[in-house]
Image (cartoon, coloured by chain):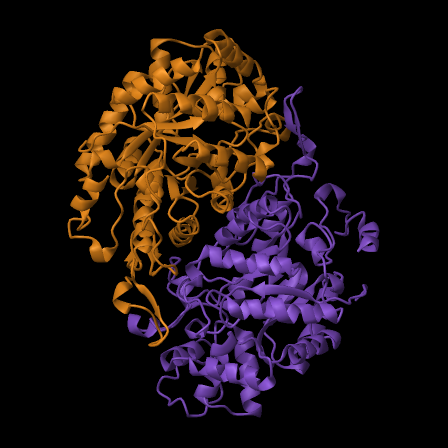
Chain colours: A purple, B orange
Amino acid sequence: MTQPRSMMKIGINMVQNGGHSSGWRHLDADPDIANDFEGYARIIKMAEDAKIHFVFLADGAAVRIPHSNAEELSYHGHIDRFEPLTLLAALAAITSKIGLICTASTTYNEPYTLARKYASLDHISHGRAGWNLVTGWSEDESLNFNRDTLMEHAQRYARANEFVDVVTGLWDSFDDDAFIANKASGQYFRPEGMHVLNHQGEFYKVRGPLNLRRSPQGHPVIAQAGSSVPGRDLGARVADIIYTGQKDLQLAQEFFADMKARVAAAGRDPSQVLVMPGLMPIIGATEAEAQARMAELKSLVHPEVGMQLISKTFGDLSHLDPEDPVPLPLPESNGVKSARDQWERRLREKPMTVRQVYEEISLSSGHCVVCGTVETIADHMQRWFESGACDGWNLMAPYFPSGAEDFITKLIPELKRRGIFHREYEGETLRANLGLNPVPDLKNKSNDGRSKSDDRISMSN
Amino acid sequence: MTQPRSMMKIGINMVQNGGHSSGWRHLDADPDIANDFEGYARIIKMAEDAKIHFVFLADGAAVRIPHSNAEELSYHGHIDRFEPLTLLAALAAITSKIGLICTASTTYNEPYTLARKYASLDHISHGRAGWNLVTGWSEDESLNFNRDTLMEHAQRYARANEFVDVVTGLWDSFDDDAFIANKASGQYFRPEGMHVLNHQGEFYKVRGPLNLRRSPQGHPVIAQAGSSVPGRDLGARVADIIYTGQKDLQLAQEFFADMKARVAAAGRDPSQVLVMPGLMPIIGATEAEAQARMAELKSLVHPEVGMQLISKTFGDLSHLDPEDPVPLPLPESNGVKSARDQWERRLREKPMTVRQVYEEISLSSGHCVVCGTVETIADHMQRWFESGACDGWNLMAPYFPSGAEDFITKLIPELKRRGIFHREYEGETLRANLGLNPVPDLKNKSNDGRSKSDDRISMSN
């Protein structure tokens, strides 16, 4: 890494109804928040007041829960959610500093449409947009998009690689200063400032230009969440943020080092790609109170929900009793390979029962859960950050709104006191606040892909 | 029509940079408004204060101007625009009553994605969303979506018919009262309240359900703008609003009568489908001032722009002098058939020069322009409304912001004085404000497709 790095970056991961599968059943939870724009808005404004870098919205274009009938499905609190770009655009209008990142799949979208939407969000928010690029692991999504099965993993990533190049190419359709709107001459833009993409690849044929001037960030921030080898390579090549699920410090350090090496191998500056795992803090005034809260959350998991949730990674285990050990080896998966591989490694070291596994998955969708006081949770975050395991965190609340209020009003101030979280937004755009260099337009991009003014920009960061 | 109809409905058609192709060059125009969210927001709030029923955003997923090089294109002020669903979601957060309608094409979108986005906008806006369904007439769009040519007209409409059924089917995935979030039992929704679409048609295979509860309007309002026979039949079958370009009273009356007859033939109540042509008022304190303003606008049309704009309907006429008459017959078109046919009829009656035609097309994209004082423009609107030519209007401003401020602050008050425009929004949703019946969920829909409570609902309107 070429730049000093003393402050962690933090996003708030707004899983609808909370990151815990059954958090909506908690006494303090508002079980209708998935459908309450004003409820979302209050939390995001609170996060902005706390200087959290961005809100992060995951997404899927389906009810992504394996089930055989409506009765089974009806116990899941993660059925309904707003389409996230629509939600972020609405949030853009009532916030001014916080970044706005959400997921869209390269498998079920068209690059021209996606490029327009994120560029429009970037304009409307004055430079705060980000795209979390996914390829989609869910069979259920396929069935909503004219397919009978999930597209094969390698094929999904081959398409994703081409897709993202089309999107960034379209974002560069015009130079930053192309639009002049000269009333006297009648010329609306400088012709030499337009760049028609004329893309013809293996999967996409897109002429361009984008029908939108270049947005404030040029390229909205790109996050990427695939942790398989093709996923890591794609992230290393194009992403600004790597979103990942990591529960073990050593594995997280390995992942972090591997990602930074891949970024360097791709000819990019490793400090310019931020590794930000998910983390769900469960906060108590004492350790005992926090442990009790976690036990309470686990007790809320309906067995119907637990058994179905684990099938995503473990296949159908419904023939087993919850107290049976999970049988190894795990079945091969066409979905999220990285989660499957991590679980296989863990279970070989320490077997677990079906119930133990589903209680953990139910807790945080496979992300790290840290249970304790504000001090011990801050200790954990600081230790990981300072020992090369991450550049920051995507914080998840087990339920809303109080689960988020807890970490915004208690944990974030502790991180500020320790001097490892910023007290003010540094700039006007999400890139500036994350310490990421601007992306020069084509006119200002030198042949090696670096900005002609990179040196000046780096010095000012 | 079965209901009394005393009030016209009015939308504000926010063509980026104004409805006049070169309005951005006007002394009073803000030439950067296409890129200015706050500028849009000010106009929409002003329109809401005036009780305008909805904002209407047209769209295209391309720079839809035929050209052979960047220099030719650079004189066009309609190059860049925000993606409209993104813009409407942002506007939803800062308004509370005005409807939010925008265009999306059935040719370049997936029905599942589109259903989610409009349903999300309907939730976030508390029942104010509308979808203007188009099939896309532009060759340029095709080239951005993996195609070499524009899909053939009949094929586009065959797909559109199936597409809209998938979308409305997905909107009915859950009954209005399906979500119960019962913390004690752990049941999040009533299983019998979920309806899985399982659509398998000629063009689409979509399982469902939508991953979103039913939205406040159930079905967001559907507008439809195709005036060809397949377009009219599609509109008669599924639309709530028919958007059309009409310049001649008699032709407009014929269109109106034809549409209402088609609606009745489709088994629907003709009063529940609103025919709303576009109209661009050019307002002066006197007739002479208004005429001078129109002449000024015409003088702003750069010949490069004029010659290119007419090629959409008239084919390439660049070999002609602007003072030559337009040669007949017009070439066959795969694009907007209705515009071509109307022009052919007009030119057979009264020949025009190339310049005369392009100045008119440049003025309003083929919509009716009424030039005069507030009184004479209101006379025109009232005459059309009361003589069975329309149910209301989509008002276009020649340029922004003052072109819109003019009709919001001068024309709308005159219509209120005459008692032909409402002084307050009637209800909470766009449907209610337009006098359209609610769309019952599947549980409350009787076998003939009418609400079980239609009689009660009709009485209360």
Q: Nearer the viewer, residue A302 or B458?
A: B458
> Residue at (61%, 43%) from the top-left corner?
A197
> Residue at (53%, 15%) from the top-left corner?
B298
Which part of the image, by quadrant, shows the C terminus of chain B? top left
Counting the numbered discs, the total is 0
The reply to whether residue A2 is in sight is yes
> Residue at (36%, 75%) from the top-left corner?
B186
The reply to whether residue B344 is in sight is no
Q: Is residue B26 above or below residue B171?
A: above
Q: Is residue A239 above or below residue B329?
A: below
Asked if residue B434 lies left or right of residue A407, the reply is left
Picture quarter containing residue B55?
top left
Asked if residue B351 lies left or right of residue A221, the reply is left
Q: Is residue A139 above or below residue B233?
A: below
Q: Nearer the viewer, residue A389 or B1?
A: B1
Q: Nearer the viewer, residue A233 or A404?
A: A404
